[in-house]
Image: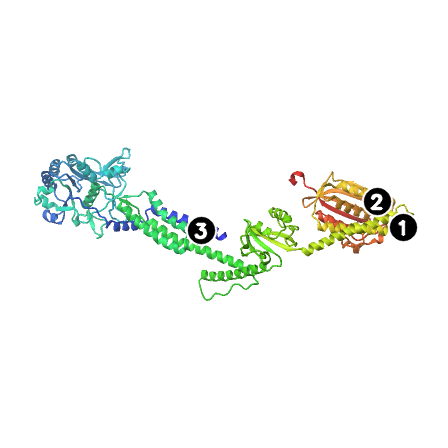
Amino acid sequence: MKLRRRLGIEWAGVALAASLIVTALIYWNSLSGFDNLLYDQLSEYDRPEASEEILIVAVDEDSLAAFGKWPWPRDRHANLFNILADAKPKAIAFDILLSEPGDTDEDQLMAQAARQNDNLFLPLHFVFPGSNGADFDVKEPITPLKEAVTGIGHVNLLFDRDSVVRRTSLCFGGITDPADSAKTVWPHLMEQVYRSVSGGRSSAFDSLENCQKPLLMPYANRGAFSQVPYAAVVNGEIPAAFLNDKIILIGATAQGLGDQHPAPLGDGGTVAGVEIMANMLNDIMADNFIAPVSTGTQILLSLIPTWILLIGFWRWRPRTTIFVSIGLVAVILVASAVLLSFQIWFAPGAALVGLGLVYPVWGWRRLQATSDFMGGELKNYRSETPDIPVLQSSLGPVDLVTEQAEELAHAIKHVRDLRRFITDALTNLPDPMFITDLDGKVKFVNKLAQTGVEDGAQDLALDDMLDRFVAPEDLGDVKNYLALDQQAREHDYIDFTSLNDEVFAMRRARVLSNEGELRGHIHYLADITEVANAAQEREEVLQLLSHDMRSPQAAILALLDGQDATDDNKRIESHARRTLALADNFVGLARIKSSEFSGEDILLSDLVIEANDSLWPLAKQRGIKSTVDDQTDGAFIVGEPSSLYRSFANLIDNAIKYSPDSSHISILLRNISLDKQPFVSVTITDQGNGIAEDMLGNLFERFASNDADSKGVVKGTGLGLNFVAAVIERHGGTIRAENVREGGAQFTILLPLAPEPADAD
């Protein structure tokens, strides 16, 4: 349990740490480099087809060679607009910024040419940060052109951390004036073009709750879009029919013009801004943008493989775990590719890191916890078995865990030897023995218990096992004994007669685990046939003593009653009474040791007074006064009235015997407390010569008596005080004898006070 508990804590720690790390990696987009690289590779296998409607009019190297260095005069753009107006394309996007005014005449000329085109759109751009505390400043086309064209749109590019343009947003918005809370939103230039062609907003735009949310753009192959030089169009080299009904994007493609950006294409080169716009328009038209999963979904999907592996650690073997781990890696990559084919992007980096983190860390923590546990258990094992050479030296230099494994193997071998030893010892016990589990099934039987039972004794029901040993007349008592949930105590057994007329004492003991949990019971059958026969003979002897020996003595005393009190008669009466007392004490001692205690509530003061009154004639004969002082206020004890009565009668009788004539015997009863436990104290004090010093140490032993100072008619037998001590001990009390300073002997008896009725419940 200790190892399982520690492994559980370690597992919870690894699970929590891995979950937090995966979540943090996703939240801070820490693995974007890996995820983007994988996205680029997967994109190679499913690139979209370029629309034939899109035509790029490129400011390329040939055009620069024809018209001179950039920028060109705006009347040249006016010429282009005039030519395009005659060709009647579907729409025109002029991807060249015109936010700064030029020559006024040229600007007006270009504006006039722009008005001739029905669907002409110009770009705007933003300057970050803005002036006067604004988030940004908007740089729109100059006023003549803005008023002349159909519309304007933003052409912002979104760069990933590796400066590659993979994403775009269909609009851009923000607060342009801190004093004005109105929020202005500018659709993308390509969104504007699409609306002019289709007559409505794109599906991608409508599907987004926030049009500024970045979307992944699938790129067509490099050069997939039709492209003609700017100079060729202006010089009339391109037929108007070729330009008719096309969506024309005008922009710079020459390397020296600075409008080249990295794109996720396999060759690793740059792509002109106008070609990026063409790809975006192509994606808008085909509605094939790739939507990244939300952050919450990304975290959930990334944690699922990690938790599958974490849960599997408790169920699978290490070999299975490694194969499952590899399989989960493959599943993550395949799932990412499959989702990408459905235009959903799940970045697998965090999920892969979760698996790569959990497997080695858990393996390390589990190995460490197991190593620590084995080290601790082996240390305890060595300390608990100091005299048994179990552990052997290792076969050679090895790492710590291997060394512990070797020690564990040696320890297991020794435990097997101990198990064999215990099994052999139990099997060859001289009495029948069997072990049952908590369900009452027999799990082990020794040879003697196996006698008469077929090989299927194991898993035999307890009742069936008892039927094979216990005589029918005792079977009910045995089952009642086994039904009690009792702790082991002095007389925790039951006698029964077997089917073969043998007498067994059945004792049941609990089988407990190292943590104290009950696992079953051991049932031991001791053959007490000879003891039972001896007990029967002892009972017959007791009957002889109590009847056959008492009867003649009683007859002698009856014959002497009324006879002359001659010396011979007194001597005969003395011996008869002494023999009678000896028989009574002997029988009393024997029966105390052979019977169970059966107590009842007794008012102790009444019992002592009754015992004292019974000896009043003997005390009066010698002029001795015996008084009882009860200070207990009616204290009760739990006891056996007959044996206690005889005990106090013996003590008072001894006090009378050893007291001088005309003396006083005091009997004091009071309540006292020892160690917070309530007791009743009975003190009997006489005025005799006291107890000889050599007798004090063994006064309560059998046949210990000194009748030298006895004044009574009947001398002591040496069994009276032994009987008294046995009775007091049987009642859970104590007795002490001592000499008082003023002279005389004093006996002090302590008996436990009976519990209150509420406590007794």
Can you identify the residue that label 1 sits on?
A: 569
Q: Is residue 140 visible?
A: no
Q: Quadrant of residue 50?
A: top left
Three-letter code, disc 2: His
* Residue 537 to residue 601: above or below: below
Can you identify the residue that label 3 sits on?
A: 10
Rendered residue at 72%/53% (across/down): 536
- Label 2 or label 3, whichever comes before in sequence order: 3
* Residue 177 to residue 709: above or below: above
Residue 109 lies, in percent from the top left, at 11, 37
Residue 169 lies, in percent from the top left, at 25, 41
Secondary structure under tag 1 reads: helix
Three-letter code, disc 1: Asn
- Label 1 or label 2, whichever comes before in sequence order: 1
Mark 2 and mark 3: span between their CA atoms?
Answer: 81 Å
Counting other residues with Cα less than 10 Å from the Cα at mark 2, is it few (<14), some (14-19), or many (20 or more)?
A: some
Between tags 1 and 2, which lies in front? 1
